[in-house]
Amino acid sequence: MDRRDAQRLTQLARRFLVRMESRVDKNGFVDALTVCEALTPDGGPQVSADQLVAAAHRCPGVIEIRNRSVRLLAPGAVPCTPPDVLYHATNAHGLQHIHRKGYVSSSDDRLVFLSADEPSAWRVAHRAAASTAPTVIYIDAMRARRAGVMFFRSRRGCPYQATAIPSRFVLNLQAGFGHQMAAGGIPFRRTAGGAFELALIRVARRRGVTWEVAKGKLEQGEPPEVAAVREVREETGYEGSLAVSLPLGRIHYPFVTPDGAPRLKTVFLYLLRAEHEGKAFAPKLDEGVRAVEWFDVEEAIKLVSHTSLRPVMQRVRAELASRADVEEHAWK
């Protein structure tokens, strides 16, 4: 199939799907055979599902075919991997819809609009709420994506969009939901040879052993930057000097406690300057910290696998690269 035939077929499918709103399921899909029958001209050759698949691959971004079903994609939307947590602006009526239907969807059961940060979602909620109570719900996008929910980003920079999201992935609508505040830091030092190194902790979790950033809960009334230094000291056992060098922002991710309660964790992160002459580490074994080691920047980035931390590690790389020359005198 050449590109012209593929464009013609996908555009015909688009027009048909727009007219078939009453027959789509909650995720916007229509049976592929129904679509093929509608696209077959009177007296002409039958349009097959294979031809439809080939056209969708040839002209991506128009329709999606999955499990012998066809769905119309939003104009300009492209599939993506979202942050671990996304935010959806709604109101009292929207909450009733979620409880009644059992999933988050738009009024016509098409794509749901989502924000990457909570303040933006609240602004949308207040603008759209009118006389009903504005509300923001927290979406566990990481688990929703693993369960088959599709997420999209517009090429024009619009908010994230998703297919219908089952209500079990809405954190703050689940019983026992809690919001946990934490802080942590990434110690760095410059070696005698001029290279930067980062300190990571090796932690034993239920899912296995991973290299992570040291962090922990904020105490009542404790400033995040103070908590970050305290937690890094406690988990690494580092006795050398540690000073906040740069705020790295916040990350958000969902987790479930051992007793099954849903949580949203917000972590304030900082880049911490450590002594040039490294002190010994004494890992906090009773909290699962198995080891603490220094790594060069590129190796540390590869070792930290948590998706929420990847942008943070990239920022650390850029920051230290910019300091490579201008701060050389500070380490002499």
Image: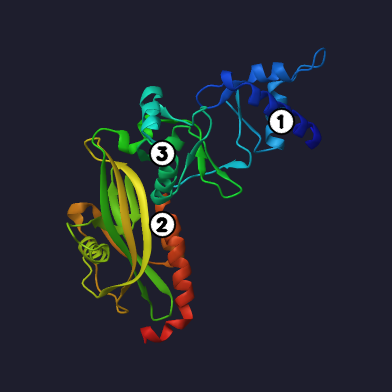
User: Tags 1 and 2 in contact by the CB under 8 Å rule?
Assistant: no
**Residue type (three-letter) at the residue carrying disc 2:** Leu
- For mark 1, give the secondary structure: helix
- For mark 2, give the secondary structure: helix
Q: Where the N terminus falls, by quadrant?
A: top right
Q: Position of residue 157 (x, y in %)?
A: 57, 50
- For mark 3, give the secondary structure: helix
**Residue type (three-letter) at the residue carrying disc 3:** Ala
Q: Which residue is mark 3?
A: 129
Q: Which residue is mark 1?
A: 10
Q: Which residue is mark 2?
A: 303
Quick check: 178 above or below 184?
above
* Label 1 vs 2, first from the N-terminus: 1
Quick check: 79 above or below 245?
above
Dot 2 surroundings within 10 Å: few (below 14), some, or many (20 or more)?
Answer: some
> Going 79% across and 17% down the picture, which residue do you hit?
41
* Label 3 vs 1, first from the N-terminus: 1
**Residue type (three-letter) at the residue carrying disc 1:** Thr
